[in-house]
Structures are given as structure tokens and as C-alpha cells.
Amino acid sequence: RRPFYLYSKPQITRNVEAYKEALEGVRSVIGYAIKANNNLKILEHLRSKGCGAVLVSGNELRLALLAGFDPTKCIFNGNGKLLEDLVLAAQEGVFVNVDSEFDLENIVEASRISGKQVNVLLRINPDVDPQVHPYVATGNKNSKFGIRNEKLQWFLDEVKAHPNELKLVGAHCHLGSTITKVDIFRDAAVLMVEYIDEIRRQGFEVSYLNIGGGLGIDYYHAGAILPTPMDLINTVRELVLSRGLNLIIEPGRSLIANTCCFVNHVTGVKTNGTKNFIVIDGSMAELIRPSLYDAYQHIELVSPPAPEAE
């Protein structure tokens, strides 16, 4: 059948091992961002290598459970989480990141319906510029995600008011995707540990720092020198260790992008006006990014060899 995706399981393993090596000596969870690629076989392989999962929808939550991920290594993100999905997360013991006032209300209700206390982290917007495409920047002050730091006390008071429903275990931030300058992770971590210090001063026993945001990849296949997992972790290692925290990271495309290719066949060529078109059997149904926001997609001619191709 065609078109098809071709994956390298050994390369996926190597990518996971690079993060594990970088995290040596740090209590941590490698939370794979399922939105990067939700192929069930890939999820099962990542789970077998000890990864957790980062979820942004009820479908991803159910997929993670189907793939056998440890629920205590799963983190439910998003600013539009549905009540029924929050109930499932509560029943399974998944961590939930609080994104807004109404999100907190829904989490409380989910706890009451399920009869389970929910482990929550507060998603604080650090207002750090990730210097990426604006469509994938999530940590600046005008982002729809997270809570503003000036509202932190209100959320702490609400958690205190619901001791049977909520257990505050940490703080979360998310900077964006395709990040190529790891110093912004340190900038965010400095702010986040200060918030954690304040949260602890108010009597909360928080032990998790969840820093979301993914490393960039060499989209242009131009030999770009990009930061490695070791570069990333080294920017925050001492801060995490100094507070005795568990670090949750959320890699997505840096775990999977260089492990696969999308194989198409040319069905024909045509010309309209002054423009030539190569028509293939793949479409934006399988690869939407170029059409969605003009993202670059690297293309290679595999066969026939280039000298023979017109």
C-alpha cells in the first residue's frame, strides 16, 4: 500500500538513550509529547524504554492507556480539557496541569465524580520568548495557555480550599516548539524555581518541576549544529538539584522526527500556465504542516537516481 511512513526503531531507541544519558543523576520523567506522533507501535516502544507521556486531549489519554504507559508518568495538558476526560485522568492517577480558573473548577468536579484526589501542577506562564514561529510559541504573556504569575495566589488559595479533591505536587511551564536556543530553558527554570520556593513557603510539599517545550530539529537537512539533550539538561540541572526536584520534560519531535520518512510515488507531472507540478499519491491528509502554516518539508528523490530524472 502507498503512500506510507517508514520508521527506524533503533533510531528511536538512540534518541531516548540520549535523553536518559543527559538526565543521569536527576530524578526525572521523559514525557513524550504524543501530539508529535501517535502511532500506537511507536508509543508502545517508547513506553518499553521507560518514557512517560504528555497528553493534550482525551483521545491521547486513552491512547496512552492503551499503549500501557504508567499513569503516574502521564501528564494531562491543555486549556480545553473536557470534564469526562478529566474524570478518566483522575480515576487512572494521571497528573493534571491546571491551566485556568474554569479548568481548576472542572478538575475539582472530576475529583468528586471519580472519588479520587487529583495530583495537579500549576501551569504558570513565564513570559519567556522562545524565538520560534509564533504559531508554536506558548510561553509569552499573550499566550492562551497557562496562568499569569499575578494570579498565582488565587490558585494557591483555591487548592487550599479543596484539600480532598486536589493535591498540588508541582509547577509547569511550556515555552514552545522547535527551540534552538537552550538558554531560554534556564531563563524559564530560574523563574519557575522562584515560584516553587514561594509555593513551598505557603506549606505545599511540591516536588515536580515540569518544563515543556521541545528542541528543534534540522528541518533543512543542511548540517545545522543544534543543541542536544545534554545541552538542554545542563542548563537546568543545578537549579533542579538545588531544590531537590523531580524534573519532567516533554520532548516530541526531537525523539521522533529523524526516525521516519514519508514515502510517496509520483503519479504524473503537469504544467499550468508557467508553473510545473509534480503530482504524488500523498496529500495534506497525511502531511498537513506545509499547507497549514507554510512549514518547510525536506524532499528527496529516491528513485530513479537523480542523473536519470527529468
Image (cartoon, rainbow, N blue to C red):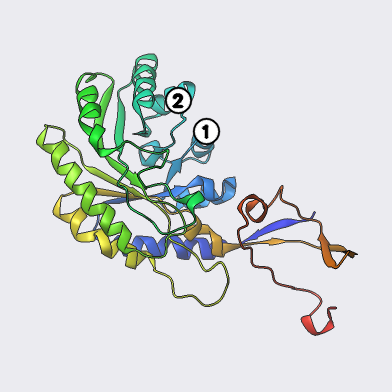
From the viewer's perspective, tell me whether residue 159 is left or right of residue 48: left
x, y percentage for residue 190?
Answer: 21, 53
From the viewer's perspective, tell me whether residue 94 is left or right of residue 299: left
- Tell me where residue 270 sits by quadrant: bottom right
Residue at the spot x=45%, y=25% of the render? 88
Q: Amino acid at mark 2?
A: Leu
- Where is mark 1, residue-wise? 62
Residue at the spot x=39%, y=69% of the render? 227
The local crowd at label 1, few if under 14, some if 14 to 19, many if 20 or more residues have their Cα within 10 Å, is: some
Residue 245 at least partly seen: no
Q: Nearer the viewer, residue 183 or 259?
A: 183
- Where is mark 2, residue-wise? 88
The local crowd at label 2, few if under 14, some if 14 to 19, many if 20 or more residues have their Cα within 10 Å, is: some
From the viewer's perspective, tell me whether residue 282 is left or right of residue 135: right
Tell me the quarter of the image containing the N terminus.
bottom right
x, y percentage for residue 171?
Answer: 27, 40
